[in-house]
Structure formats: structure tokens, C-alpha cells
Amino acid sequence: MRKILIVGAGQSGLQLALGLQSQGYEVTLMSNRTADEIRSGRVMSTQCMFDTALQHERDLQINFWESQAPRIEGLGVSVAAPGSHAAPDGSVRAIDWVAKLDGYAQSVDQRVKMAGWMETFAQRGGQLVIHGAAVSDLDFFASRYDLTLVTAGKGELVSMFGRDAARSPYDTPQRSLAVAYVHGLGPRPEHPDVEAVRCNLVPGVGELFVMPTLTTSGRADILFWEGIPGGPLDVFQDIKDPNEHLAKTLELMETFLPWEYARATKVELTDGNGTLAGRYAPTVRKPIGRLPSGGLVLGVADVVVANDPITGQGSNSASKCAAAYLASIVEHGDKPFDGDWMQATFDRYWDTAQHVTKFTNAMLAPPPEHVLNIIGAAGQVQSIADRFANGFDDPSDLDNFFYDPDKANAYLASVTG
């Protein structure tokens, strides 16, 4: 029986651990926190998983919360008109539409999912080690395993994986991030029965994403600001009090997005750990890390491809990476997990991840005219809206119409006549 060590207990690490476990591998999982500590800790992300990623969970029969989590059937885009926050009725939107997803999306608070998956892994006989691993720890442990996978995307371990400059156009954070989990958000009055992720764009300022989720206390909504650094939304770094964080979130909504603020006047935090703020530079890294003793380890998901969350791809990419790596490990049989295999395994994941990175980096930049034309036309032609929205599930389709002005114009002409 082949022995595999996985460091990190997030979406990719746990999905991979449970998948390998189901295939008969002897898996050891290292986490710096217990399941109870995760469940009672601070929120970790704004995960919205689309159909392809959810299917990977269904395939492993670990979709434990699918019947409880809200079914997100739409994706809406609203663009604030210049100076709209000063309008008398506070409701001016230059663009406003909602698209239908081919397969529903879902969001489950990672405190719920990771704690539950970790307990399942242990119940099924997996070796769970609660220990914050340093490179020296990994050097000691790795020789005892056939393969060591690093899925913990922060801290010292990431330093083993060199930055891939050719695939990393940004070397500084492109957004200031601020998250609040709330109860009491009202429906969008124009679509009161549609569960949708709402993407609100304020040109030159940033974005607000609103998404339904399942959290530790049941159904909730996530309010997620992405602010351009140095701009009016870049104000959360020094806020430590959760209630002050929520108050600032709402104040900015009232100023820039009054139509979203109008349904948020009665919200309250889901819990005292329901806020999060930070920033990081989007980075692609080399997939193979070398330990001081010369041993090799393979980076997974955020360790090797860390995108800004502006396109909501983090958990999706982690799931897709875990699925690709699982298939690659199983197919490899009893052969050694050498450097060539590690590079080929990453390349298999990069086939899909490259489209995510391209999409995300494009959305971080000011939109060119042809992109504005697509988003505007989506408000007039439902099929355009639907195609763009489903690009969040399969970003490879965006290559066909989204990035190149000629392709965009040809697509719009074919649809609108």
C-alpha cells in the first residue's frame, strides 16, 4: 500500500485525502488546527463552487451539505453609472442583468466543510496529525512516504516553490479584500425568487460580490468588497472589531451601491468570527519544491496557482486540481513519483488552471471597450449573459469570444445580427 503525506487541510488537501483514501492509499494528513478549532474559528474564504467543481465532490460522495446549501441558479452583473451614488433615488445602474447558470452553484462555509471532512477522514481510518509543519518538519517526514503533497497556501512552506515570473504578471496585490458573513439580507426586489451571485462593479473603485451561503448557523449571505489599492474601499486593514468591519461595509454600500444597501439595512453578523480582511499578490509558482535533504515535494492548488478571488475561482480551482492530481496518482500505479511525474501532473492541472489565471488577470485590469460591449449587450440578449456567466464554471470558453476584440465583435454580430 503506497503511503502519501498531505500537508494542509483545505479544499484541495481534504478532497485529495478522501479521494486517495477511497482508492486504498495509506494517507497521512497534517493540519495546524483541529476540526473543532476550524469550526469555531474565523471565516476563511468566499467560496462559490460551480457545477464542475461540485461534481468532483459528488463523484467522491463527499457532497454532504448539498441538500442544505442554497442553490445558486443565477449570476447577476450590475455596473454603477458615473456619479450614481449621488442620484436622488440612489438607484442608477448603467448595466443590470442576471444570467442563468446551466448547473447550480453552491457555497458552504469552509469552517463547516473542512471540519466535517476532517472528521470523516479520521473516522475512515486516516492518520490525522495536528501540527503546523515547517520545512524542517517536512524534511524529516517526507522520506517516510512515497509522495508528499503541500496544499497549505500560506507560510514558510510556500517559500519552497519559486515564483514563475512568466505566468505572474503582477508582483503586488491588485485588490484589498474585505468579507462579512451576515444574516438578514433581503432579496433583490427585481428578482425576489432568484438565488444568485451578484457582481457589482464600481468603475475605478472596485467590486462588491454578494452570495448566498450555508454557514455554521444556517443560511446566510456573504458581502465581499474588492477594493482597488489606495482607493476609497481600501480601508479595512486596521479594523479589528467585527462590528466596525460590518458598519464600514454597509457605509461603503450606501455610498457606492445604494440598490444593494437598500436590502442590507437589517443585517447582522452571523458570528463574531464572520469577518475577514487582507490582500495578496496573484502568483503562479513552480510546482516542485526541494527539501534541504534533496527530497522533492509537489505543490497543490493555491500553493502553485494563487489567483485573486475577483472571479470566484479559488475553491473551484482547488477542487479541479485535487481531481486532476488524484487521477494522475492512481494512473501512475507503483512507479516512483519522481520530478518528471510531478511536472507532468502539474501540467495536467495547468491545462485548466491557465484559463482561470487568464480570466482573473483580465478582470483585475480596467475593462477594454470590447469587454464593456459584451457586458452591455448581455443586458439586451439573454444568451450573451448566460454564456458569460457560465464562463465562471468553464473559463476556457472565454477564449472564444471574451479577450480578443475581433472575436468579441464577431460573436456579438452573430448573436445580435
Image (spheres, helix red, strand yellow):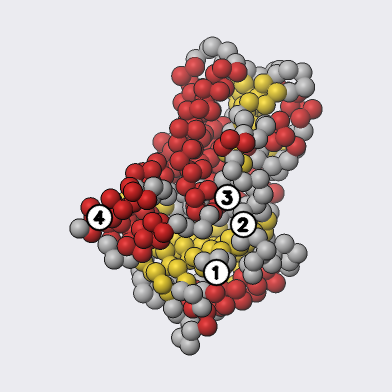
Q: Compare residues 312 and 414 and report the one nearer the observer.
A: 414
Residue 283 visible at all: yes
Q: Residues within 10 Å of mark 4 (few under 14, many from 20)?
A: few
- Amino acid marked by disc 2: Arg
Q: Compare residues 42 and 299 and report the one nearer the observer.
A: 299
- Amino acid marked by disc 3: Asp
Q: Residue at x 56, y 17 (%)?
A: 340
Residue 64 visible at all: no
Number of the label disc, if any, that sits on residue 183 = 1
Element assignment for label 1: strand
Q: Which residue is mark 4?
A: 413
C-beta proximity under 8 Å, tags 2 and 4 = no
C-beta proximity under 8 Å, tags 2 and 3 = yes
- Mark 2 or 3 closer to N-term? 2
Observer-side mark, 2 or 1, equals 2
Q: Which residue is mark 2?
A: 175
Asked if 343 appears above or below 206 in the picture, the reply is above
Q: Residue at x 69, y 67 (%)?
A: 235
- Mark 2 or 4 closer to N-term? 2
**Whole-percent x and y of residue 150?**
64, 32
Q: Which residue is mark 3?
A: 308
- Mark 3 or 1 closer to N-term? 1
Residue at the outermost right position: 136
Image quadrant occupied by the C terminus = bottom left
Asked if 4 appears above or below 260 in the picture, the reply is above
Q: Is residue 416 left or right of residue 56?
A: left
Observer-side mark, 4 or 1, equals 4
Q: Residues within 10 Å of mark 2 (few under 14, many from 20)?
A: many
C-alpha distance separating marks 2 and 3: 8 Å
C-alpha distance separating marks 2 and 4: 34 Å
Q: Is residue 317 left or right of residue 287?
A: left
